[in-house]
Amino acid sequence: MKAKKTAIIGGTGLTQLPELDVISEQAVETPLGMTSGLLTEGKWHGNEVIFLARHGHPHSVPPHKINYRANLLALQQCGVDAIIAVNAVGGITEAMVSGHIAVPHQVIDYTWGRESTYFDGEFMPLDHVDLTFPYDEVLRQKLLSEATAAGFLVSGAGVYGATQGPRLETIAEISRMERDGCDLVGMTGMPEAALARELGIPYASICLVVNPAAGKAEGEITMEQIRAVLNGGMEQVKGLLSHFLMAE
Ligand code: HPA
């Protein structure tokens, strides 16, 4: 049987994966341009893993300028069987406190002006993929069962609202998103999930809440507040990834 190859797309706070036993690092050029950074291929618990830092390393590409199409196309070219995305997010609903981890089940896309499809009539002929369930349910359930087995407290559902950024939101925007049913707010969940579906690659996301969304706590949101949660939180996320790969 062919060995599985899992891609991990790291977001803010996860621009490197020192746990990888690195085999190669390569810059990949696709017909749609360059990826955000080098693709690092290696082994983790004996599994083939490819790591890509979504914002580059060092963290420099803003959410609206990420070449999501090139990133996912490159991962497909490398033959990955699954993609686990890691996203730092703001928490909207009560359970989504700082430091909490969620594996979302739905998404609402508030972004605009991003290259968000391969089926644009240029790169590929027009087509319409189904996105009823934007995340791969098998992958989500695997992540959740490993989280439970390893004793991590993880929300097994949540609606991810993808905003344009790089600015954070206003209180009124977050109130609207809450009325829409969003639990989490982030800037990079889309079009990534939709592009993975267009390529037919199973995709799921691990979201780490790094701040209460605008208006959900006293005062303004500061980068200091976010950084204070990121380091420890991403160690937790890596712990979950590690258990997931061990069980693969
Ligand atoms: N809003 C949007 N994206 C984010 C946030 C937020 O509050 N926190 C981390 N990413």
Image: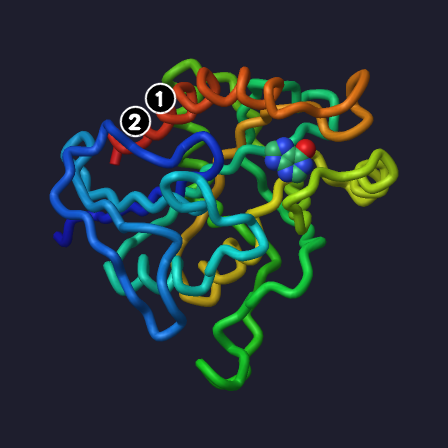
Which image quadrant is residue 143 in? Answer: top left
Which of the 4 image quadrants contains residue 151? top left
- Residue 18: x %, y % from top left: 25, 29
Task: Indicate the quadrant where residue 152 lies.
Answer: top left
Badge 2 residue CB within 8 Å of ligand 1: no
* As drawn, 138 above or below 152: below
Identify the residue position indicated by label 1 in the image.
Answer: 239
Q: Residue at x 35, y 42 (%)?
A: 8
Q: Along the line of sight, which residue is nearer the eye, 7 or 142? A: 7
Callouts 2 and 1 close, C-beta under 8 Å: yes
**Towards the viewer: 126 or 123:** 123
Residue 86: % across, % down: 46, 37
Q: Amino acid at mark 2?
A: Ser
* 3D distance between C-alphas at marks 2 and 1: 5 Å
Instruction: Please report the residue visible at 14 percent of the width from the left and 53 percent of the height from the top.
Output: 2
Mark number, residue 242: 2
The amino acid marked with disc number 1 is: Gly
User: From where the camera sits, is residue 96 visible?
Assistant: yes
Q: Residues within 10 Å of mark 2 (few under 14, many from 20)?
A: some
**Residue depicted at x 56% and y 47%:** 188
Q: Where the C terminus falls, by quadrant?
A: top left
SS for dot 1:
helix
- Crowding at dot 1, Cα within 10 Å, few <14 / some 14-19 / many 20+, comes out as some
> Given the current orientation, which residue lies at the most extreme right position?
172
- The image quadrant where one finds ligand 1 is top right
